[in-house]
Amino acid sequence: MTETVTPAAKTAPKAAKTASKAAKAAAFPDFEAFAMPKMEVPAAFREATEKSIEQAREAYAKVKNAAEDATDLMEDTFETSRQGVVEFNHKAVDAARTNVDATFSFLKDLMGVKTVAEAVELQTSFARKQFDVLSTQTKEMQELAQKLGTDVSAPVKEAVEKSFKDLKVN
């Protein structure tokens, strides 16, 4: 047997969809209190809003650039500090090694003296030499520390000066 499709059978699914939409509309009627009024936004208000958005974007870009510059500055400063401290520590270890070597050499020579006069002369010579070496080492360490301070503070100083120039321009 063959089925025959009647025109009423074709429209049944469409009618069911329409009835479903009508039921939903009846369950959630439109409330005037929550309806958005249809009104035209004044052109001046629209322009002011667009201008505010553009200014906010520009301000964000400036803040983002400033933050990136500050991050780069901090990274450079920390790297400079690290290198300077490593160099300073190497210098301190070299100075300590030099002083220890000189002290052991002095003790070795002191064990070989035959008279008290030789011991006093050796001690006086060692003390004078160590004073000169210690003075030189202290001067070198001071110069290195001063160089480190200058190297670390220079980028910060430049960034602060640049910031003040930018503030004066704006």
Image: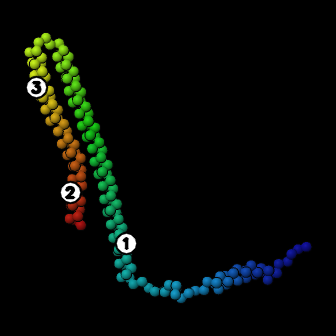
Q: Which type of secondary structure does the marked residue at label 3 adopt? A: helix
Q: Position of residue 168 (x, y in %)?
A: 20, 65
**Contact? badges 3 and 1 (CB < 8 Å):** no
Residue situated furthest front in the rendering: 116
Residue at the (26%, 40%) spot, across then down: 85
Q: Relative to the observer, which residue lies in front, 57 or 70?
A: 70
| Residue at 24% from the left image edge and 50% from the top image edge | 155
Q: Name which of mark 2 and mark 1 comes first in the sequence.
A: 1
Q: Amino acid at mark 2?
A: Glu
Which residue in the structure is indicated by mark 2? 161
* Residue type, label 1: Ile
Q: Nearer the viewer, mark 2 or mark 1?
A: 2
Q: Quadrant of the N terminus?
A: bottom right
Instruction: Name the residue tied to disc 1.
Output: 53
Occupied quadrant, residue 27: bottom right
Label 3: which residue? Answer: 128
